[in-house]
Image: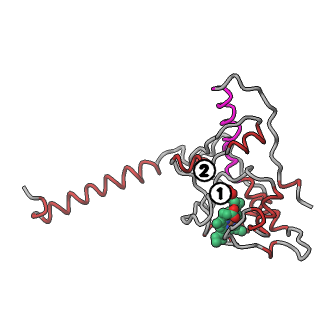
Amino acid sequence: MKLEAKAFLLVVVVAAFMFLGSYFTMVVPLSDPTLNDPGKDAKPYTALELQGRQTYISEGCVYCHTQQVRSLLEETQRYGMGEEETFKRFGIRALIQAPPSQPGEYVFDKPHLLGTRRTGPDLGRVGGKYDNTWHLNHLRDPRSTSPGSIMPSYTWLFTKAGQPTPDAIALVAYLQKLGSNIKWREEGVAQYKMLHPELQQAPPVVAQTAKEVAP
Ligand code: HEC
């Protein structure tokens, strides 16, 4: 029997498949009661971080940057911790992959800033990757830290003397918070050490916080 020849039956079958598709990809996940549970390490934003989030929105960072690591090897490796960084902070040479984004990380994001365009790299795991001074230099002049960067210079977030305005400090605090709702660096390194018991235990270097650069 040629289904294409029976218009009514075709419509019914297509509708049934569309219903099943939407049901299992939208209704079932949305009715998951744990969807709005914060992860065990998720913490609400501080007032400073919230102010920075507002600056992130008003400066349009979301138009070039996403905040979602998908479950693809290319992304978990690219946004993870490279050997240099792992060595500098934890004393071991290992590539620690960034875990894919999880719903519990976003419960304090209203509205979420997942983004759709990736002109720049994903920022979902950028917190802790650089220190605050790096971020301030990068915001004032992206070419100074990333040669050839096409990111605009946010000179208006700095005074004429080059000092960061409160908005710049808040923005950096927000950037440092991104991805910190799961302790993936510490857990990744702990897991790596468990798998390689021959490694010496090295004391972790604590990441710089925004307060240290605040005037
Ligand atoms: C026109 C697109 C564009 C806009 C708008 C933009 N960026 Fe970028 N951003 C980039 C590109 C491209 C890079 C990669 C090169 C570099 O490091 O500068 C980047 C890199 C970054 C990085 C480093 C990421 C990493 O993992 O190395 C951070 C942090 C960042 N941007 C923050 C911001 C913030 C905050 C804003 C808003 C104030 C912003 N960006 C606006 C394009 C953009």
Magenta run includes residue 184:
yes
Q: Residue at x 31, y 52 (%)?
A: 20
Q: Quadrant of ligand 1?
A: bottom right
Q: What secondary structure is found at the residue carrying circle 1?
A: loop
Can you say whether 17 is above or below 207 in the image?
Answer: below
Q: Quadrant of the C terminus?
A: bottom right
Across and down, in percent, residue 186 comes to 71, 37
Type of the residue with mark 2: Arg
Across and down, in percent, residue 139 comes to 76, 67
Magenta run includes residue 182:
yes
Q: Residue at x 27, y 55 (%)?
A: 17
Q: What secondary structure is found at the residue carrying circle 2?
A: helix
Q: Is mark 1 within 8 Å of ligand 1?
A: yes
Residue range corresponding to the magenta coloring: 178-195
Q: Based on the displayed image, in which of its 4 quarters is residue 122 positioned?
A: bottom right
Name the outermost residue toward the top: 198
Q: Residue under label 2, please give it.
A: 78
Q: Residue at x 69, y 35 (%)?
A: 189
- Please state if 168 lies on the left or on the right of 76 as rendered: right
Q: Residue under label 1, please give it.
A: 123
Type of the residue with mark 1: Leu
Across and down, in percent, residue 41 comes to 69, 42
Dot 1 or dot 2: first in sequence order is 2
Q: CA distance from mark 1 to mark 2?
A: 11 Å
